[in-house]
Image (cartoon, grey):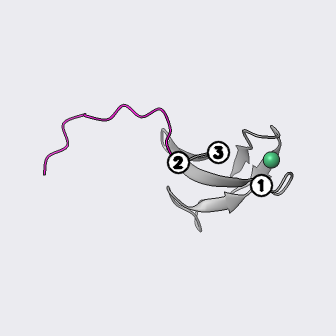
Amino acid sequence: MKVQCPKCQGNFELDAELHEEGDSVECSSCGTELFVVKKGKKLGVAESFEEEDEDSQGWEG
Ligand SMILES: [Zn+2]
């Protein structure tokens, strides 16, 4: 799947079979280290692993 680098806005291929949330990947265009994040049902990338999360959704335990 194609994802967009937040740094250089370039698109690159992220293999969703090989990566999961929290993995670090490198932008193939600018070489920036990026983190795999969940974007809805799909994966995306972010510069740091702390997306605007809406936590406290009643996790038990
Ligand atoms: Zn980039």
Marks 1 and 2, how far apart in space?
15 Å
Decide whether residue 37 is among the magenta residues. no
Decide whether residue 60 is among the magenta residues. yes
Q: Quadrant of residue 4?
A: top right
Marks 2 and 3, how far apart in space?
7 Å
Whether the residue carrying mark 1 lies under 8 Å from ligand 1 is answered with yes
Disc 3 residue type? Glu
Q: Nearer the viewer, residue 22 or 4?
A: 22
| Location of residue 42 in the rendering, given as x and y in whole percent from the top left corner | 54, 45
The residue labelled by disc 3 is: 47
Q: Nearer the viewer, residue 17 or 36?
A: 36
| Location of residue 48 in the rendering, given as x and y in whole percent from the top left corner | 58, 46
Say whether disc 1 or disc 2 marks the residue closer to the N-terminus.
1
- Asked if residue 9 lies left or right of residue 46, the reply is right
Which stretch appears magenta? 49-61
**Identity of the residue furthest to the left in this view:** 61
Say whether disc 3 or disc 1 marks the residue closer to the N-terminus.
1
Disc 2 residue type? Phe
The residue labelled by disc 1 is: 27
| Location of residue 14 in the rendering, given as x and y in whole percent from the top left corner | 69, 57
Marks 3 and 1, how far apart in space?
10 Å
Element under label 3?
loop
- Mark 2 Cα-neighbour bin, 10 Å: few <14, some 14–19, many ≥20: some
The residue labelled by disc 2 is: 49
**Identity of the residue furthest to the bottom in this view:** 18
